[in-house]
């Protein structure tokens, strides 16, 4: 799982690697470097490295030394974000759950038990994480803790600078930095501190049951140029490098060109402060002119609707809406944030032709009051206090006696059971049968189940299976205003207006509750309601299959599995599934298609690939997405009406050539016969480039006086290795309209468009076509700026028969 973000101490750009399989590290870091980045950021997760007090884990994916050496090998720098709190939509914000039970502890404040436990954990670079909102909430205690953390970090004598992100009061010599969608107005709290943008959010996280949030690359480039529970297993974040390790185009390529353009301005940017000049009502120039010579300019058009034609240094420039042009010499444009010159790759999950999975099943049991492992208590207990997060699951078990004379038995009416829970999911079993389920959301974790239940005369067993979907990361909302105006001196004032989700704000989240806390009430009895809240309850931590480690290579043989073609079609709840498969012989990334299942967890060769949940997103709010205007996470949504996450990445390094063990635990019931392996690859590639697209090569010709002609912009198309371009679906040299997948011919169109692209590209893995009238057999419309739009189909190369 990776997220790519920009990080700017002057001109440093960075990839933030949240979590990944260690065998993928070098490839990911190399792609980051190829994309123009200089620094790799990584969180360090306390709960992963110290799962129990004094017991440390720096193996496998937690091998921090190996990670740093890998980055060094590729030739990049490292920025460690050590915490102790990291957020990252990670379970409990990165804190180990045992920390919650240290006597007298209060998280992230001036609290001796917390500081004593956090002290040995900190050893480099970034201290704390987005603590500003907490500091204000805690008042004097928060300010004291912040100063303690800074002094402790600096006192370690590491010899590297320390930063605090989103902490405007960071004490000397700690550097305060910015996180957010935009940081153009950010300044450090001292003029001699560098301006650093530690998180430029390339998208937004995804939560079960919600849409997928995307951020247009034009807006991300525009932003860069001016300077927990219910989280899905995927942390793709619409990043330039996706969770499978593949580059996402056009985001990767466009940002790569942006990084090249900014680095051409490096000397001017680090040697002078900008001079801001108005170029129009919503346009301005930011000019860097060092005394030593040279000049770099950024021409901005903040109008969200219209192109702007501006005069700068006695030359005219056309600026698209909501865009910035970069001029490394204050004369020639080498990059515009809104003009994409790289291809768009349409990715698709392709079913494999691998062998069908042969499933075996094992039915887990509804917990019984007679089992020896149960805890018994009067009243309802908070879930994490009982489980200590050793399992997502906790059984709450009680019984109720029904008199045979009850009227609802005589009339066939069923009583109603209501259950109030603090979250996150709940399954209700009456006498061993599933009666119903209820779910919270990340925004509202609380649950109220209300449903008719089948009770019989005599003793009835009520078993409530409470399910945690990750522990709280802590969130709050910050409201700011949005305004763009001009002051009297003609300087533009920007005040971006959004309701912003601050990802890790809110004090005392260690006190938040999970599980069934009541009331639990039966309605419809002759004598009135039966309140079960304070009667005797028994508790069982986890599932029987968990206790036997059925998902492991050794534990899977501890029970007798049932093998039957009908077994997997019963769709029973609380069912374990097992199958074996051979590793496919192709190279594309692998995923497990879980679209036919309900909710549970999956393991490959004993390694968890995460919780799965096919909850569907609402069928609303997905519409066309414009890159212009202030970006907010709800702005560009997709996947409406579909499961939030259907495919689950299977790392290649976890597979052996044959007989790989796949184990699932399904809470609700699903159709395992439809589970399959899929490979992720490009289905089609598009390009849409104008004949006047800015190019760095032409700037170099101008700047260095090279005796060569200007280069023509080119259309570049490239399928993944093992694929070739098999067809040209659309091609037009002229004035085409639309976007990738929906191109149409405009008023001007060259009839040679298809034949030229087909001749150059069919049968090739990659191709390049220069945009010129000569290349396309003549100018189809004189004195009109033309573009080439093309969509090509990528297909697998036919494998020779053996």
Image (cartoon, helix red, strand yellow):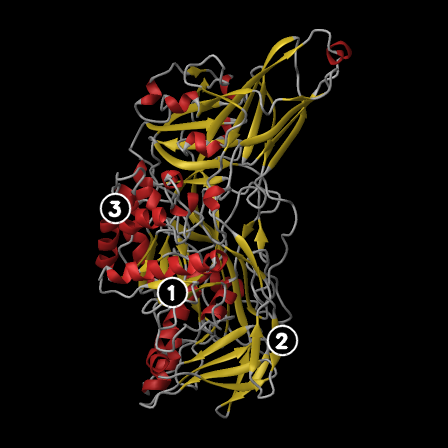
Distance in Å between CA atoms under marks 2 and 1: 30 Å
Camera-nearest residue between 596 and 576: 576
Locate the C terminus by quadrant.
Answer: top left
Relative height, residue 492 to residue 384 (above, below): below
Q: Is residue 733 left or right of residue 800?
A: right
Which residue: 32% across, 81% down? Answer: 267
- Residue 602 percent location from the top left of the image: 42, 32
Which residue: 55% across, 84% down? Answer: 491
Q: Which residue is mark 3?
A: 63
Relative height, residue 492 to residue 100 (above, below): below
Q: Which residue is mark 1?
A: 7
Nearer the observer: mark 2 or 3; the answer is 3
Marks 2 and 1 close (CB-CB < 8 Å): no
Which secondary structure lies at badge 1? loop
- Residue 712 percent location from the top left of the image: 43, 76
CA neighbours of label 1 inside 10 A, class few (<14), some (14 to 19), many (20+): many
Which secondary structure lies at badge 3? loop
Marks 1 and 3 close (CB-CB < 8 Å): no
Q: Is residue 773 visible?
A: no
Residue 170's mark?
A: none
- Residue 792 percent location from the top left of the image: 49, 56
- Residue 472 percent location from the top left of the image: 48, 44
Q: Is residue 250 left or right of residue 209?
A: left
- Which comes sooner in the sequence, label 2 or label 3? 3
Q: Which residue is mark 2?
A: 306
Camera-nearest residue between 205 and 152: 152
Which residue: 34% across, 68% down? Answer: 12
Distance in Å between CA atoms under marks 2 and 3: 51 Å
Which secondary structure lies at badge 2? loop
Distance in Å between CA atoms under marks 1 and 3: 24 Å
Relative height, residue 611 to residue 95 (above, below): above
Q: Is residue 230 visible?
A: yes
């Amino acid at each position: 799982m990776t997220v790519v973000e920009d990080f700017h101490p002057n001109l440093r750009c960075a990839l933030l690697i949240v979590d990944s399989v260690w065998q993928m590290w070098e490839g990911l870091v190399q792609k980051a470097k190829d994309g123009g980045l200089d620094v790799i950021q990584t969180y360090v997760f306390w709960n992963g490295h110290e799962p129990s007090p004094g017991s440390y884990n720096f193996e496998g994916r937690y091998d921090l030394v190996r990670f740093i050496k890998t980055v060094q090998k590729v030739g990049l720098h490292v920025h460690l974000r050590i915490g102790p709190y990291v957020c990252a939509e990670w379970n409990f914000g990165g804190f180990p759950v045992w920390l919650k039970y240290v006597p007298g502890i209060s998280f992230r404040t001036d609290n001796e038990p917390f500081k004593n436990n956090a002290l040995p954990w900190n050893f480099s670079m970034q201290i704390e994480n987005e603590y500003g909102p907490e500091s204000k909430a805690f008042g004097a205690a928060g300010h004291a803790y912040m100063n303690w953390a800074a002094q402790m970090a600096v006192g370690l004598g590491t010899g590297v600078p320390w930063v605090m992100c989103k902490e405007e009061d960071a004490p000397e010599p700690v550097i305060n930095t910015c996180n957010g969608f935009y940081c153009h107005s950010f300044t450090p709290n001292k003029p001699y501190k560098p301006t650093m943008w530690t998180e430029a959010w390339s998208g937004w996280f995804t939560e079960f049951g919600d849409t997928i949030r995307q951020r247009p690359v034009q807006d991300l480039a525009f932003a860069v140029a001016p300077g927990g529970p219910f989280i899905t297993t995927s942390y793709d974040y619409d990043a330039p490098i996706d969770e499978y390790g593949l580059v996402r185009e056009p985001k990767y390529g466009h940002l790569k060109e942006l990084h090249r353009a900014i680095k051409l301005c490096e000397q001017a940017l680090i040697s002078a402060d900008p001079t801001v000049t108005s170029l129009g009502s919503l346009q301005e120039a930011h000019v860097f002119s060092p005394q030593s010579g040279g000049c770099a300019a950024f021409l901005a058009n903040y109008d969200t609707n219209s192109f702007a034609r501006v005069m700068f240094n006695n030359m005219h420039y056309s600026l698209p809406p909501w865009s910035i042009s970069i001029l490394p010499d204050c004369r020639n444009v080498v990059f515009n944030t809104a003009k994409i010159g790289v291809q768009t790759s349409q990715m698709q999950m392709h079913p494999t032709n691998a062998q069908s999975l042969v499933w075996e099943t094992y039915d887990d049991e509804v917990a019984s009051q007679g089992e020896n492992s149960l805890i018994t208590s009067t009243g309802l207990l908070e879930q994490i206090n009982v489980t200590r997060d050793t399992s997502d699951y906790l059984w709450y078990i009680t019984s109720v006696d029904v008199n045979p004379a009850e009227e609802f038995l005589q009339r066939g009416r069923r009583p109603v059971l209501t259950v109030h829970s603090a979250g996150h999911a709940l399954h209700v079993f009456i006498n061993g049968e599933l009666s119903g389920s209820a779910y919270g959301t990340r925004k509202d974790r609380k649950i109220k189940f209300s449903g008719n239940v089948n009770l019989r005369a005599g003793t009835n067993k009520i078993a409530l299976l409470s399910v945690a979907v990750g522990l709280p990361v802590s969130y709050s909302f910050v409201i700011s205003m949005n305004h763009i105006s001009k002051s009297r001196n003609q300087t533009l004032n920007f005040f971006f207006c959004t309701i912003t989700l601050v990802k890790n704000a809110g004090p005392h989240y260690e006190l938040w509750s999970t599980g069934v806390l009541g009331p639990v009430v039966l309605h419809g009895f002759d004598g009135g309601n039966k309140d079960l809240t304070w009667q005797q309850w028994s508790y069982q931590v986890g599932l029987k299959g968990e206790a036997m480690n059925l998902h492991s290579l050794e534990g899977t043989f501890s029970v007798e599995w049932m093998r039957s073609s009908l077994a997997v079609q019963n769709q029973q709840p609380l069912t374990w599934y097992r199958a074996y498969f051979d590793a496919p012989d192709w190279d594309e990334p692998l995923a497990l298609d879980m679209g036919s299942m309900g909710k549970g967890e999956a393991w490959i060769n004993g390694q968890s690939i995460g919780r799965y949940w096919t909850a569907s997103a609402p069928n609303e709010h997905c519409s066309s997405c414009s890159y212009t205007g202030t970006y907010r996470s709800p702005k560009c949504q997709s996947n409406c009406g579909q499961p939030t996450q259907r495919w689950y990445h299977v790392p290649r390094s976890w597979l052996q050539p044959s007989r790989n063990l796949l184990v699932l635990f399904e809470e609700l019931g699903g159709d395992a016969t439809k589970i399959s392996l899929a490979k992720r690859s490009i289905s089609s590639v598009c390009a849409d480039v104008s004949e006047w697209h800015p190019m760095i090569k032409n700037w170099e010709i101008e700047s260095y006086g090279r005796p060569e002609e200007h280069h023509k912009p080119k259309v570049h198309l490239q399928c993944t290795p093992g694929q070739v371009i098999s067809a040209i679906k659309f091609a037009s040299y002229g004035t085409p309209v639309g976007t990738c997948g929906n191109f149409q011919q405009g008023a001007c169109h060259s009839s040679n468009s298809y034949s030229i692209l087909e001749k150059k590209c069919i049968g090739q893995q990659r191709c390049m076509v220069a945009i010129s009238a000569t290349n396309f057999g003549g100018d189809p419309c004189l004195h009109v700026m033309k573009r080439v739009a093309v969509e090509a189909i990528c297909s697998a190369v036919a494998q020779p028969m053996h």
